[in-house]
């Protein structure tokens, strides 16, 4: 997900008017989970409670003489990250290596590729979005994208996956990215601290991962990505506050399941269609990537152990929980998992 956000930062936030600039920490809104009916909140809790490692942001994994500190990150700025960084000071002093989704080299290569080849995010042949969506859907989409600083004439030619990802970021967050000149969340803070401490940084995946994630989608699946995301885009600042509060409460999997319940209520898709979209998105954005990260993590831990040191790995918090989350996959490979932020 960090590379997706980096792609957004590198290509579209320039369109947000300078007069609208603000810090992401200035975003305000209502917590939508708190506003749910009690019965719905109970269903949400039930959907989360049996998911492995569904709470917690900071973990330690040990196997023989090897150890890793794993931190679930939030990709946007927030002053509460300072407390997290303080807790990571000791693991960073011990670390032979820091691993992240995308390091500075990957982000630079991504920005270079986007500058050289606009077709990575722009439709260059075939029908545009106004031709693929209903009139009502296109009207809602163009209005939502205009709030994010992108006029309809540009939106019409953007690739559906890119539009869907952009809709998931609130206008206030995008203004914050524009004001800061980039994405400076916990991942960036971790990279900067590692650099200051002369700890090498290594990426968990190649720079072009973001483009391969969506390459096999059918036209209908692409369009449904927009349909599933569009309703929440209309109250995206509230949505951002809701998910941020859940993150800092370490209530990680509730972030995911709340999106499902919200889509049931507001997307216009059937429950089966929402579940299909959620399963597809989880497979593409989380499960497949989680599995691909295990070998690099274990290799890094083995290399570090030869120096009598450990590894610190930071990546989006939603990659931690679940039967196919990073923690469970490590556990299945013989690692002992311990939560550090209880």
Image: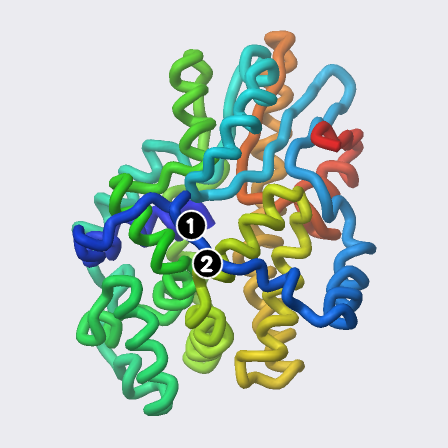
> Would you say 114 lies left or right of 263 here?
left
The CA distance from mark 1 to mark 2 is 6 Å
Residue drawn at 60 percent across, 33 percent down: 71
Determine the image quadrant of residue 28: bottom left
Q: Secondary structure at mark 2?
A: loop
Residue at screen point 42% across, 39% down: 77
- Residue located beneath label 1 in the image: 209
- Residue 287, horizontal then vertical, whole percent: 62, 54
Q: Quadrant of residue 59?
A: top right
Instruction: Indicate which disc residue 286 carries.
Output: none
* Quadrant in which the C terminus appears: top right
Return the residue at label 2.
213
The picture places residue 340, in percent across and down from the top left corner, at 72, 28
Q: Residue furthest top?
A: 308
**Which one is in front, 219 or 84?**
84
- Note whether residue 66 is visible: yes
* Residue 318 rendering spot, x and y as whole percentages: 60, 49
- Given contact means CB atoms under 8 Å apart, are the residues at marks 1 and 2 in contact? yes
**SS for tag 1?**
helix
């Amino acid at each position: 997900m960090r590379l997706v956000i980096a792609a957004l930062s590198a290509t579209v936030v320039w369109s947000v008017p300078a007069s609208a600039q603000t810090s992401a920490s200035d975003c305000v809104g209502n917590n939508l989970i708190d506003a749910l009916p009690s019965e719905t909140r109970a269903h949400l809790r039930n959907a989360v409670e049996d998911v492995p490692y569904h709470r917690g942001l900071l973990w330690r994994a040990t196997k023989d003489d090897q150890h890793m500190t794993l931190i679930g990150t939030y990709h946007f700025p927030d002053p509460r990250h300072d407390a997290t960084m303080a807790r990571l000071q000791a693991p960073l002093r011990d670390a032979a290596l820091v691993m992240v989704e995308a390091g500075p080299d990957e982000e630079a290569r991504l920005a270079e590729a986007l500058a050289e080849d606009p077709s990575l995010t722009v439709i260059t042949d075939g029908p545009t979005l106004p031709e693929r969506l209903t009139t009502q859907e296109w009207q809602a989409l163009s209005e939502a994208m205009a709030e994010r600083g992108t006029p309809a004439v540009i939106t019409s030619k953007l690739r559906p996956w890119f539009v869907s990802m952009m809709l998931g970021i609130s206008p206030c967050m995008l203004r914050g990215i524009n004001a800061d000149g980039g994405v400076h969340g916990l991942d960036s803070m971790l990279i900067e601290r590692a650099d200051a401490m002369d700890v090498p940084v290594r990426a968990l995946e190649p720079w072009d991962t973001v483009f391969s994630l969506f390459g096999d989608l059918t036209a209908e699946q692409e369009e449904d990505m927009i349909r599933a995301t569009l309703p929440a885009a209309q109250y995206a600042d509230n949505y951002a506050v809701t998910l941020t509060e859940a993150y800092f409460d370490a209530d990680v999997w509730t972030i995911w399941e709340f999106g499902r319940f919200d889509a049931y209520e507001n997307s216009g898709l059937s429950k089966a269609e929402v579940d299909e979209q959620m399963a597809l998105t989880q497979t593409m954005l989380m499960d497949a990537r989680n599995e691909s990260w295990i070998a690099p993590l274990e290799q890094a831990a083995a290399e570090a152990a030869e120096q009598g040191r450990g590894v610190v790995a930071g990546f989006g918090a939603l990659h931690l929980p679940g039967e196919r989350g990073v923690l469970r996959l490590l556990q299945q490979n013989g690692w002992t998992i311990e939560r550090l932020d209880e």
